Image (cartoon, coloured by chain):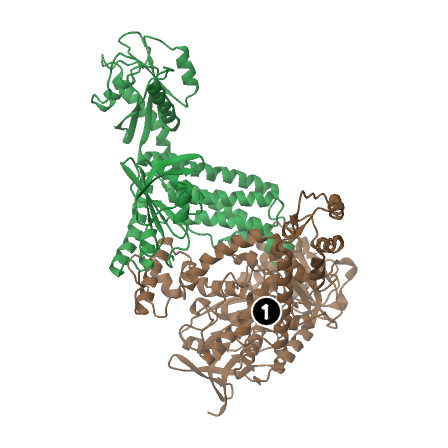
Amino acid sequence: MPLLDSFDVVVIGGGHAGAEAARVAARGGARVALVTMIRDAIGRMSCNPAIGGLAKGHLVKEIDALGGLMGEATDAAGIQFKVLNRSKGPAVQGPRAQCDRDLYAAAVQRILAAEPNLTIIETTVSRIAYEGNRVSAVILGDGARIDTTAVIVTTGTFLRALMHSGEAKVVGGRFGEPSSDGLSDSLRAAGLSLGRLKTGTPPRVLASSVDYSRLDLAPGDAVPRPFSILTDTIALPQVSCWTTYTGAEAHDVIRRNLDRAPMFSGQIKATGPRYCPSIEDKVVRFADKERHLVFVEPEGLEHPWLYLNGVSTSLPADVQDAVVRSMPGFERASIARYGYAVEYDFVNPQQLTPSLEARSVEGLFLAGQINGTSGYEEAAAQGLLAGINALQLVRGREPVILPRDLAYAGVMIDDLVTLGTEEPYRMFTSRAEYRLLLGCDSVYERLTSMADALGIVDEERLRRVTSRLQRTAAAREAIEGAELRPDRETLAWLLPLGVSIAGPTTVAGLLARPELDADALFRHCGTTGQLAHLAEIRGRLADEELEGVVNRARYSGYIEKQEREARNLRDDDSLKIPPGFHFERPGLSTEVIEKLKRVQPASLGQAARIPGMTPAAVAVLRINLRYELRSASGAGRGA
Amino acid sequence: MSGNAGRDTIVAPATAPGRSAIAVVRIDGPDAISIVEALAGRELETRRATHTSLRDGNEAIDDAVVVVYRAPSSYTGNDLVEVSLHGSSYLVGKLIDVVRRSGARIAEPGEFTERAVLNGKLDLVQAESVADLVDARAAMQSRLSLRNLSGELSRASESMRATLLDLVSRFEAALDFADEGYEFVGRAEARSLLESLLGEVRETAATWSRGHAIQAGLTAVILGLPNAGKSTLLNFLCGTERAIVTPVAGTTRDLLRETVDLGGVPVTFVDTAGLRASGDAIEEIGVGRAREVARTADLVLYLIDSSQGVTDEDRAELGQLRDPIVVFTKSDLAEGGEGAISVLAGRGTKELLARLDAEVNERYAMAEESPTVVNQRQRGAFDACAEALEGALAALRSEASEEFVAADLRRAASALGALTGAISSDDIYREIFGRFCIGK
């Protein structure tokens, strides 16, 4: 067997998870190989041409703060930026960008190409080789062998992938791309059991065949806000999207042809996502809804296709034609590529540790859709953490686990390994119990210094983050204790706003009043001469930074409450359960013991989150853990 | 220095509920000493039994004996205070309430011992027995709950939880699926829902006094004008010559208590000084005490001498009483009407007992049918839930965005979750996806 080379880390797959994993491990100093079937497909957007959204946008910001690439690539390819939930509070506003799919893939490939420690190998993988319970090598399709310490499997929907379009079935994980079958056996050989999931994609329509006068315009924000701290301005021209809908005619056609839909005919048995249902699913489950909204999204600046967000389907081609042509504006539309469903193997993530490593085999990491998630952002965030943890393994350092109150990425991974998943998992803000602490405006504060300590943050990013944090800290400090006296100018300014102050009033208190615009307040400070330095400090902040400062002042009551609650969670999360801990303990029921053995929680906090754990069981576990911890350290604590 | 286990301060009674010579309340954690010092209004010496009065603001709680233990030299290894009160569950409840308001929380079953283990004050064998204890306590509690038909309580809190779950899921949907074109939750509707839920939670929390009364027993006060036959009745009820009985009005001056089993519930009857303005200083104090105990008593018996008939004074007194049970006495001297008794002639006494029995049943047997909170821990859960619901209502009223409402609703839900199991985010999604067509 020819030995190709040896690497510290081998990443299998070049999707959003694989790209982040390979980049971060290389950035941290590991020698990394990324093996992909098609080099040009690296960073490809296999479904909708957009990045971000609620909670997903939060993940992208976290990735940026941790030194990942998704934010940068999005800024380089973004053709419509929009912050969603503008009408809600700051913590639940999520940035989203429509992207040019070709430019996006090109940006990812450019970023990877710039990484000196990273080698891209275009070939198939036949299997992963193990020695004892450790990863030893990756065997390529041609029999060549790459020795390695860590393997990160990021194969998305490509394991034993089967595409359905009506009655037709084609083997493959994405249109025109093959399936990858040998790896499923390698994962089983590692003691992992596999399940099946399903996902789908909607038809693409020729942009030239659509009557835009019949569509509603869905514009982006006037001033696009970049995802990455590395981006100063968005360079690409900005475009608009549109909306249309499916009505009675489309729903009738679908109902008449349900027996030809693979999901209903029994041809697909796997579970699909509830939050991204196919149009046939929507018509059946919500029979009384007369219309379903469809977002019409360009696939790129020059791209000839439109993406129909909302009509994911695996119905046969003739039904898709009829459905599409029933929508206003699409009467003469021609479909460039029909929608299809994909069934694929996934690994229930309860079999992984919180560092995304298979519990049964050291050095085998899994990230992305293979862990039962959906979405580019979910995949990328896992890829980043798997890459970091593979790096830590290679360097012989402790794994990195993000707490639930620190990052959505931490919430997601903890959910995955603790609860497992039976349908594709998507990030929602409501999955985080301390959501108010996880706003986009605080990502750099929360995450970058930790990432820097791991040696994975580039100099320019670090410089920008440091400068930003200094400026916002200075602003907070200046606000703290600053008081505005009700002099004549101040009263004259406040009166028309319906605000009255009796004596000196703290600026923080004024910022907490929603009827006062923060920017106007700082401007006023500049004019009264009382607090002129505040106007100056405001001048040094970008709008986004100002928002962060104001939000902190405005919502401090809620934030502090959640911080207090989060501290209790941290206590339990910091009580680690050692590997090999025996869960058969007096006081625990058989049912609880069985659950604990299946999940093998890494901390008491994680154990407490397993569904079905009782408060009494957690108490028993806690007492046992504390005791063992103390006896293991060889000395009881002196009184 | 406080030990590792015990970041927050906990409080619980250390003695069994009910009447006793003394009752001990234990407070453990970083704020234990400062809380009690604030109530005592003075510094307390370590490991010295200090006799001091405890006050909640202007209101006296009790004269107590307080012992302060400083970490690590205490049972738990933390700062720990033991307060010995007069043995009344009312006083114990009051002190615990005040301590809770000062920032402590009600201890979980076995938590003091757990802290002792976690701080290395007990060894493994003891730890195992604590583990058993945690279970045994829970089992005892569930047996107790069963006896009080607290299955009802679980069902009631389950149904409140379901209402909350529904509401949380709709607020969450409004945040996570803002562009789906639904109005997931109307604010006015949410407000009225929450207000009625809050009412329900508060009502349930308030049943604690009833549930607790059943566990700790009831107090029945015997009131009436001088010489109405109060002491005679007490003696009859307890079957001994407990009270001095003379024809002289104003013989009884202080409170006399005797406990009798009535319908399976221990009922403490309190004989009191006859209600009148006598001008006698001692008697005045006695009358004051009588009125005081009448305010907190579970049952009030008001005795009227049949030979005197209903006087204006009687009418004035009756007007101030809550649900009094009126008993005409001395029916051997004059026709007292239906239900009148004469202890001397042995007339109507059996009927009176049956009537009291029925009253106790009617007023307190309700606890067997409606959800009843029987311990401080349960009550703490409902109180915490109510507090969070108030927060959610305030957020709604101030037009705050959904995530702030949701934050409080989740706290409310997890407070109930402590009783019946937590709400997982997956429950929320099941709700959302079951009802709305979500997803593009």
Percent position of residue B31, x then y: 41, 50
> What residue do we see at 26% from left, 55% from top?
B129
In the picture as drawn, the residue positioned furthest to the bottom comes out as A2
Percent position of residue B251, x then y: 28, 16
Q: Which residue is mark 1?
A: A65
Quarter assignment of residue B117: bottom left
B133 sits to left or right of B367? left
The answer to whether any part of residue B314 appears in the image is yes
Letter of the chain shown green in the rendering: B
Percent position of residue A73, x then y: 65, 73
Name the residue type under label 1. Answer: Ala
A17 sits to left or right of B369? right
Quarter assignment of residue A572: bottom left
Percent position of residue A195, x then y: 46, 68
Quadrant (top left/top right/bottom left/bottom right) for the C terminus of chain A: bottom left
> What residue do we see at 42% from left, 14% from top?
B315
Callout 1 secondary element: helix
Decide which of B91, B167 is in the foreground and name it.
B91
Against B350, residue A488 (above or below) is below
Letter of the chain shown brown in the rendering: A
Decide which of A428, B257 is in the foreground and name it.
B257
